[in-house]
Image (cartoon, rainbow, N blue to C red):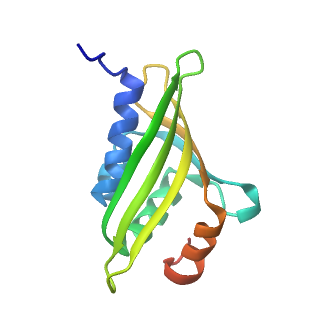
Amino acid sequence: MEPVPSTRISTVNALLDGYGSLSVTQLLKHLAADFRHRVLPHSLQMEECDKESFAKKAEGIFEIFAEFRMIPQSIAEDVKRGMVIVHAYMDGTFKIGSGKWKNECVMIIQLSPDGTKVLEIQEFVDSAKALEMRKKHAPKNF
């Protein structure tokens, strides 16, 4: 018998599905009102986002993709800290042209005590791919 995923893992899986839905409403569904998002490393100089600015950024990014998936490679839960760590591949197809987007990230996700809301995401990205996105594909406010 397979173990039942914890509430935190279920919330994180719903978050990852939200990215793949290309729907800002779906992505925001499990975010806390005081949600924060940081892209790391700091050398990329990407501003920290609150829930509202994260939604605007997501809307712009979602507009350039016809399809997008976050494909978890590993998920680890730190029960004591209420955190989930995800290593995921990103796989997308751009709307304009037939270009593909392949990338990967590690997300450190802090959840509410009951595990139902995402409080914070620290997202470590491939710096070279982030710069490529900024130069070639990025919408405003990226």
Residue drawn at x 46%, y 33% as measured from the top left: 75
Residue drawn at x 52%, y 78% as measured from the top left: 140
From the top left corner, tell me how far across and down residue 128 is, in percent: 64, 68
Rendered position, 65 above or below 36: below
Depth check: 99 or 32 in front?
99
Compared across the picture, whether 85 is left or right of 14 comes to right
Rendered position, 86 above or below 133: above
Depth check: 26 or 33 in front?
26
The number of callouts visible is 0
Residue drawn at x 58%, y 15% as measured from the top left: 80
- The quadrant the N terminus occupies is top left
- The quadrant the C terminus occupies is bottom right
Residue drawn at x 26%, y 17% as measured from the top left: 2
Compared across the picture, whether 40 is left or right of 58 comes to right
Rendered position, 94 above or below 41: below
Residue at the bottom extreme of this rendering: 97
From the top left corner, tell me how far across and down residue 17 is, in percent: 31, 47
Rendered position, 137 above or below 5: below
From the top left corner, tell me how far across and down residue 43 is, in percent: 76, 61
Residue at the right extreme of this rendering: 43
Compared across the picture, whether 38 is left or right of 137 comes to right
